[in-house]
Image: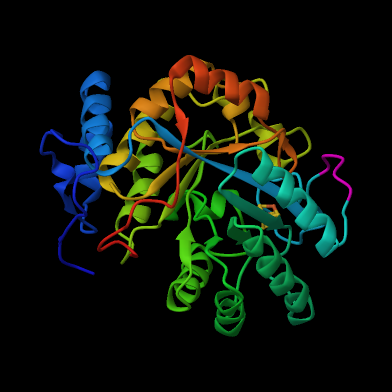
Amino acid sequence: MTMTETLAPAMTSGAAPTSGDQLRNDWTRAEIAELYALPFTELVFRAAEVHRAHQAAGEVQLATLLSIKTGGCPEDCGYCSQSVKADAGVTATKLMDVREVLQNAARAKDNGSQRFCMGAAWRNPKDRDMPAIVEIVKGVRELGLETCMTLGMLTPPQAEMLADAGLDYYNHNIDTAPERYADVITTRTFEDRLETIDNVRKAGINVCTGGIVGMGETREDRVGFIHALATMPQHPESVPVNALVPVKGTVLGDMLADTPLAKIDDIEFVRTVATARITMPLSMVRLSAGRESMSESTQALCFLAGANSIFTGDKLLTAPNAGDDSDAAMFARLGLKPLAGPEPLRAGCGG
Ligand code: SF4
């Protein structure tokens, strides 16, 4: 898609027309940099307008993430405690038994999750792993949950197997700006990431891709990160925005510990969310890792700026996360509701 396309009808009446009324994938970096640098209240206001015009404001999707195969990953992602290169005390496990995965999924559903995301610490799944993965996808779907998997790089036939099993979403983060990629990961390239995302798209699976801020990058890098997402041929249906959880024993955790860069500035984080919302109006923008160390006020600003999805549960793969109880209390205080029913129809963008 190189032309602009008209969006789905506004979900709330009386929404003011905004720059988000056209779905664009021809954003220039300069335009995104300009948005990012707007006075903060103006940026959040614009993002909230776009959000209200195209999403069910006040509703937040709940997703649960389960690690179905932890640790021992041959990749060297500098942020990750599951890499074999990290010394973060993570014990490697085998692929979780199908029944155990389904028990976890049933619990997540009871706790209000609509989507069950499953992550395996692999560079790529081996073909011998695929039958169990397919069984898991089918089983979780039968429970009435949306399914999402993150398994590393996929070949076209593997993506098609997952599509045939009914997988709804595949997560494969672009991690950071293209020009920063080699500073964070050396065992694969940015282009490798795009190739798997392309395989997933071609198989007809919805794309979940985002990345991490707070890895010592500059604002210009964050602009590049959003630009890479917002100029994809089709916007990702889900855009997770993580704040780095610096873990001791990981490359970035050790490098950034005790420096002013150890935590992304809250305002800068909200700016990233707002810019993602304005440039990708129909995507679900998800607060992911790092949320447990964010104040409720910062999270509230993120929701105002267009974040509309969170991971619930006590653990995000291996990192701590805000628990279900504290999220329920926050939702009550902020008057937020879990997203009801299926996501809004996405015309034009991947719909
Ligand atoms: S982020 Fe994923 S691919 Fe990278 S080391 Fe961790 S588990 Fe492996």
Residue, x 59% and y 85% (percent of image)? 157
Q: Is residue 150 magenta?
A: no
23 horizontally vs 111: left or right? left
Q: Is residue 90 magenta?
A: yes
Q: Residue 169: horizontal and vertical position, in percent?
A: 52, 62
- Quarter of the rendering containing residue 349: bottom left
262 horizontally vs 265: left or right? right
Magenta stretch, residue numbers: 87-91
Quadrant of image for the C terminus? bottom left
Q: Residue 318: horizontal and vertical position, in percent?
A: 75, 41
225 horizontally vs 152: left or right? left
Residue, x 76% and y 49% (percent of image)? 104
Quadrant for ligand 1 reads bottom right
Render colour scheme: rainbow
Q: Is residue 69 visible?
A: no
Quadrant of image for the N terminus? bottom left
Residue, x 64% and y 44% (percent of image)? 64
Q: Is residue 288 above or below residue 9?
A: above
Residue, x 23% and y 25% (percent of image)? 45
Between 121 and 285, the residue placed more toward the observer is 285
Q: Residue 272: horizontal and vertical position, in percent?
A: 38, 35
Q: Is residue 337 above or below residue 131?
A: above
Q: Residue furthest bottom?
A: 157
- Magenta part, dominant SS: loop
Between 343 and 218, the residue placed more toward the observer is 343
Q: Is residue 7 visible?
A: yes
